[in-house]
Image (cartoon, rainbow, N blue to C red):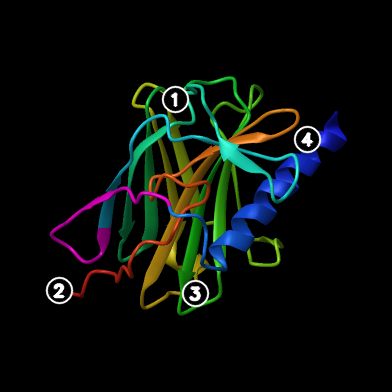
Amino acid sequence: MRTRVIAVVAAVAAVAAAVLATTGLAPARPATSRPTPSPSSVTLTDPTDDLWVIGPGEDDWDPFPHSRPWVDVTGATVRHGTGAVTATFHFVDLRPGHWQEFSLRVASDQPFRRALVTTDRTHPGGRDRLLNRAEDLLSCPGLRHHVDYDADTVRIRLARECVGDPAWVRAALQAHLFREWDAIADNPHNTGPVPTYTRRLAPPAPR
């Protein structure tokens, strides 16, 4: 069983990496992007029940016809601050006890980075890690997260120094619920199986 689960996780990662690196995915309705006063942040809203099941193969994805409120993203906010890039996911009904992964991909004028937070029954508060494009584990003392089941939110804070102090960033967010044979996915960017990146977000100008 462990081997099957590891294969599912690898397949999901491969699907997301491949589609984010290319264009031409089947049309998906974009989520609503509300204007914000600052070019340093963006707020996304996403419809409910737009879930996808991914796996067991890398090229297998289909709409998921059932409700899973603990992985169903309703929106998100991404902010490029003076000290960190912060992403906050909002869910219909986030619940402990599930094996889930919350992903923040950061593309910028510096090398690609992906921050992950993983929860399970043993670690309901989650564990985080930072990867590069080759999936190598990177050291980042400035990576922080907070899983708030009462507020139905997950926040990931990635220090700018862990991203190379970029002049701008574009972010792609996604949530997965892992099962034995496959995974259920949602993102706040569109109604498709993998996210698109936000527009460029620059840090606030010094005062």
Q: Residue placed at 72% from the left, 50% from the top?
A: 58
Kind of element beneath mark 3: loop
Kind of element beneath mark 1: loop
* Image label count: 4
Counting residues from the N terminus, which is met first, the one under dot 1 or under dot 4? 4
Q: Position of residue 53 (x, y in %)?
A: 60, 36
Q: Name the quarter where the N terminus is drawn.
A: top right
- The residue beneath circle 4 is 5
Residues marked 1 and 4 touching at CB (< 8 Å):
no
Dot 1 amino acid type:
Leu
Q: Would you say residue 23 is visible in this rendering?
A: yes
- The residue beneath circle 2 is 207
Residues marked 3 and 1 touching at CB (< 8 Å):
no
Mark 2 or 1: in front is 1
The residue closer to the viewer here, 71 or 48, is: 48
Dot 4 amino acid type:
Val
Mark 2 or 4: in front is 4
How far is the residue under mark 2 from the one under mark 4? 50 Å
How far is the residue under mark 3 from the one under mark 2? 22 Å
